[in-house]
Amino acid sequence: MQCRFCKTELTHDFIDLVNSPASNSFLNKEQLNEPETYFPLKVYTCDKCFLVQLDEYKKSDATVGQTIYEGKCTKCHKAKPVDNFTPERWTGILEKMVPKAKLDDTEKQQVTAYVMIHSKKG
């Protein structure tokens, strides 16, 4: 990884907190027993310019989908817990709700990934 400011290769770990949940991913009562998504939290210091910075990571479609679901899919009504429905039922729900929520194709893919991973099994 290179420094965002001076492009020097980063070799000095300032602190490594291993994996942490997203800072704004507060859980409600129903989510307390569900698996939580964790991300690497490693902080580097540039030896040349001393800029302290985090490593970059790409959010998965499912993680972004959760953010969209909790933001856009709750504007008109309270969202049901995702595991209330099977993947088959979610397919029908999404067909109806995606146009109402005005999701583009990418957002639809991300929300679909999220609900399919966390839907009711069996």
Image (spheres, helix red, strand yellow):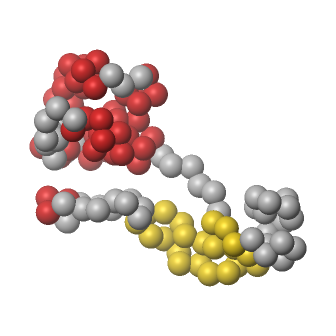
84 left or right, relative to 108? left
The answer to whether residue 113 is seen in the rendering is no
Please identify the quarter of the rendering in which residue 90 is found. top left
Q: Residue at x 55, y 70 (%)?
A: 41
61 left or right, relative to 111? right
Image quarter (top left, top right, bottom left or bottom right) of the C terminus: top left
11 relative to 76, above or below: below
63 left or right, relative to 44? left
Q: Position of residue 53 (x, y in %)?
A: 67, 68
75 left or right, relative to 36? left
Which is nearer the eye, 115 or 54?
Answer: 54
Q: Residue at x 40, y 35 (%)?
A: 110
Image quarter (top left, top right, bottom left or bottom right) of the N terminus: bottom right
47 relative to 32, above or below: below
Q: Position of residue 98 (x, y in %)?
A: 29, 23
Q: Position of residue 31 (x, y in %)?
A: 20, 59
51 relative to 25, above or below: below
72 relative to 118, above or below: above
Q: Position of residue 43 (x, y in %)?
A: 63, 73
